[in-house]
Image (spheres, rainbow, N blue to C red):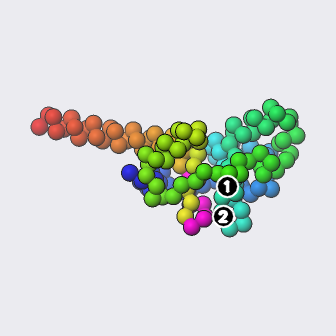
C-alpha cells in the first residue's frame, strides 16, 4: 500500500500559513478548521516548516504570552520530514512512530500536495484489516 491509497480516500486538502503569519492568527486557523497542525509554505508553495498545537503550548510555557504576537516562523519546526505519494505506507508509518511525528506533508516536485496524519494512517490500516478479516471469514464459511 502507498500513501496515494490513503490520499484517495482522505483527499488532498491542506491548510497552510505563511511564515510571517502571527501565532495568534495561527490559533484561529487551527480552531476554525478543527486541526492540530498547519504546514508553513513559502512563495512557491514549498514546505518551509510545520507548526502544531504542541509547538505553541511549549513556546507559551517557555516564553510567555508574547509568543502569540510573534510570527509563526519563530515557533515552527523548520526541518520538516516529508513523504511522496508513492511512498510505502508501512515505511511512512514506521517513520512517524519512530520520530514521534503526527503530521507528514506530502510533496511532489518540491511543492506541497497533501498532508497525512497518524490518524489517517491508522484509519486506512483498520479499513484494510477489516476487509481482510471479512474475506477470511467468507472463505472459512464457504
Q: Is residue 111 magenta?
A: yes
Circle on res. 45: 2
Which of discs 1 and 2 lies nearer the camera? The answer is 2
Q: Residue furthest top?
A: 61
Q: Residue 39 placed where, x, y %?
A: 66, 52
Mark sitting earlier along the chain (1/2): 1
Q: Residue at x 57, y 49 (%)?
A: 104
Q: Is residue 35 magenta?
A: no
Horizontally, is 48 left or right of 121 in the view?
right
Q: Main secondary structure of the magenta part?
A: strand
Q: Residue at x 80, y 48 (%)?
A: 74
Note whether 137 is above or below 6 in the view shown. above
Q: Residue furthest left?
A: 142
Horizontally, is 113 left or right of 48 in the view?
left
Q: Secondary structure at mark 1?
A: strand
> What residue does disc 1 label?
16
Whether pointer 1 and pointer 2 mark residues with C-beta atoms closer than 8 Å, the reply is: yes
For residue 25, say whether it is visible: no
Name the foreground residue: 130 vs 62. 62
Residue range corresponding to the magenta coloring: 109-115
Name the foreground residue: 45 vs 31. 45
Q: Residue at x 66, y 62 (%)?
A: 46
Q: Residues within 10 Å of mark 1 (few under 14, many from 20)?
A: many
- Report, in whole angstroms, how far the alpha carbon at label 1 lies from the one at label 2: 9 Å
Give the quarter of the figure containing the C terminus: top left
Q: Residue 4 placed where, x, y %?
A: 44, 56
Circle on res. 31: none
Q: Residue at x 56, y 60 (%)?
A: 107
For residue 42, say whether it is visible: yes
Amino acid at each position: 500500500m502507498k500513501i496515494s491509497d490513503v490520499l484517495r480516500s482522505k483527499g488532498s486538502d491542506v491548510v497552510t500559513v505563511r511564515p510571517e503569519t502571527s501565532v495568534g492568527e495561527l490559533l484561529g486557523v487551527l480552531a476554525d478548521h478543527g486541526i492540530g497542525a498547519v504546514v508553513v509554505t513559502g512563495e512557491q508553495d514549498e514546505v518551509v516548516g510545520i507548526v502544531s498545537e504542541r509547538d505553541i503550548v511549549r513556546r507559551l510555557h517557555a516564553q510567555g504570552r508574547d509568543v502569540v504576537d510573534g510570527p509563526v516562523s519563530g515557533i515552527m519546526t523548520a526541518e520538516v520530514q516529508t513523504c511522496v505519494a508513492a511512498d510505502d505506507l508501512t515505511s511512512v508509518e514506521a517513520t512517524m512512530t519512530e520520530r514521534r511525528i503526527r503530521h507528514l506533508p506530502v510533496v511532489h516536485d518540491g511543492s506541497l500536495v497533501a498532508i497525512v496524519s497518524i490518524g489517517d494512517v491508522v484509519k486506512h490500516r483498520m479499513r484494510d484489516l477489516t476487509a481482510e478479516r471479512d474475506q477470511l471469514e467468507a472463505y472459512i464459511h464457504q
